[in-house]
Image (spheres, rainbow, N blue to C red):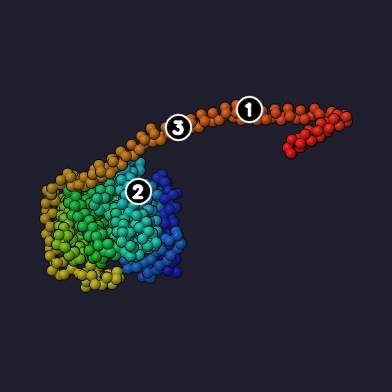
Amino acid sequence: MSGALLWTLVLLPAVPGGALALAGGDRGGRGAGRTAAVVAVAVAAATAVLALLAAVHRPRTTADFLPGGPLALAVDGLSAVVIVTVSAVGLLVLLFSTADIEAGRPRFFGLMLLFLAAVLLTATATTLTGLLLAWEVMGATSYGLIAFHWRTDGPPAAGTVAFLTTRTGDVGLYLAAGAALAGGGTLALDALPALEGGWRDLAAAGVLAAALGKAAQLPFSFWLSRAMLGPSPVSALLHSAAMVAMGGYLLLRAHPLLAATGWAADVAAWAGALTALALGAVALAQRDLKQLLAASTAAQLGFVVLAAGVGALAGGTAHLVAHAAVKALLFLTAGAWLRTLGTQRMHALRGAARRDRRVGAPFAVGALALAGVPPLSLWATKDEILSGVERPALYGVALAAAVLSAGYAGKALGLLLRPPARGQQRPRGPRPAARLPLVVLALGAAGLGALALPDLGGDALKAVLGVPGEPAAGAGTTVATGALALAVTTGAVLVADRLPEPARARDWLGLEAAARALVVRPVLAVAGALARFDDTAVDRAVAAVPRAVRRLAGWTARADRSGVDGLVRGVATGTRRLGAAALRPQTGQLHQYYAQAIVLLAASVVLLLLLR
């Protein structure tokens, strides 16, 4: 039963998702679109129920897949929390999508269900075999979702950038699998810390590269900016509870491996802290709401990566869950305004939160939670992560990143709460199907911080994760950081339209340009040189071979005609002549035979006498 529950959890969204993605087109009728939406929401609801059952019963199962690499799935404390979060957010986003997505519904909902299945497989995989399978499907479907509006040039190019950038990091998982087979002969994730010296280091480096790429951490962060060309529900799922979140989840899962190497944990901690700081500055400089949310996603996932590096697993998990609700809420509200007002520029959205309170109130809750204002969710979860940081320099960077969180969240809140300009279009309220997800996510953004508070849900979460001894933030620290976040947020709200917006930061620190200069152009140059070598050398060599073969064949044919054929004809001619000569004595006259016999006998006698 337990094995069937796990396989059903993964296959339930995968099978109808694949059918919808293959059968649905952009020009399907309204009936097909409504059917696809109903099927997707029903499947997502059933998947959420199965996720709750799996979280309670903790099933595990194994199936033969590759020699030495079975497809093993299991639910433990960490994956139980993650699958419930992913399935719940996925259901709410799909429900919102029924009111937001019009064209290409079967393809959209099919890809979303396939993506959901890949994330659930990622969260439950206990071997690199299953993880690689899920990782590949997740990457492929994310490309299809980001490039959903494929009839225009921008989204397909953005999907390509996102796909290739994350694929660069994904190579690390294959390195980790090779190191696991070479160093221990098993692909089980929990066996990686026990690999022999150098193989363990290689596996840790591969896992780090793959996770940092998916989580949009430095230096991979720029792909997240391009991904904002996808539909807003795609951003709400991929960049809240899934895709980028799976990079953080993988590092939380691999913390024993990182700690066993003696260096990988420090690399993860500093990568997360520096990403939180740098991308926080990028978010503060943005003028586009979705770009601000994208940069803040990379920054907030930086705290999760930091938690994985310092061993604050409970704080990192709580932050992952709370951030999923906060960021899904903010992306969906941005999508609602984009649909009704046709813009994402924050200066053009002035007053939108005030004039459309059914969207504005949830947005305000999400923005205040993102800022870390108490008692909302990300206030407590950040403190829980900071409590695990022991190095003063690392703590200082992380604290500065937390201050920037209050700054960019306050900027967005301040601009959208400003009195609207005279004559500004009044946004229409969201459709009924979109209201419930916003309310539920707002409640989550407000209350999920309880997972990091010891007297509420923090101790229970640590017990579920099996880390009851992890340090907790002190009361003095939480009060101080809460007051700091409140002060910075208030200041940012007041001066939102006067905050500096450096072009370099607004351009995501030039990370994409640097990647093109350092990676893309050299690779293209090498590829061009190899292509020219292929055209001038290899192709000429290939073309020269048949010419040489034809010449050799001509020489061989002439040798055959003049030599071999002549020899064969000579042998045949000689044989005929010998045959003709042998026929001459055969006259049929008896006296001639007697004479021949006497001559032969005499010759034999002479020969015998000569040889004696």
Residue ID for mark 3: 543
* Crowd rating for badge 1 (residues with CA inside 10 Å; few <14, some 14–19, many 20+): few
Quadrant that contains the C terminus: top right
Which of labels 2 and 1 is toward the front? 1
From mark 3 to mark 1, how far is it between C-alphas? 34 Å
**Which residue bears the numbered disc 2?**
143
> What number is the disc on residue 268?
none
Marks 3 and 2, how far apart at CA? 40 Å
Question: Mark 1: which amino acid?
Answer: Gly
Judged from the image, the secondary structure of the residue bearing numbered disc 2 is: helix
Amino acid type, mark 2: Tyr
Secondary structure of the residue carrying tag 1 is: helix
Front one among 174 and 39: 174
- Residue 429 seen in the figure: no
The answer to whether residue 27 is visible is: yes
In the displayed structure, would residue 319 be above or below residue 168? below
In the image, taking residue 303 as reference, residue 140 lies left or right, namely right
Coordinates of residue 64 in the picture (x, y in percent)? 46, 62
Give the number of the mark in front: 3 or 1.
Answer: 1
As helix, strand or loop, the secondary structure at mark 3 comes to helix
591 vs 435, left or right, is: right
Q: Tag 2 or tag 3, which sits nearer the N-term?
A: 2
Location of the N terminus by quadrant is: bottom left
Q: Residue at x 22, y 63 (%)?
A: 310
Question: Which badge, 2 or 1, comes first in the chain's sequence?
Answer: 2
User: 45 or 355: which is nearer to us?
Assistant: 45
Q: Residue at x 17, y 51 (%)?
A: 281
Q: Which mark is residue 566?
A: 1
Q: Residues within 10 Å of mark 2 (few under 14, many from 20)?
A: many
The picture places residue 268, in percent across and down from the top left corner, at: 24, 58
Q: Earlier in the sequence, mark 3 or mark 1?
A: 3
**Inter-mark Cα distance, 2 to 1:** 70 Å
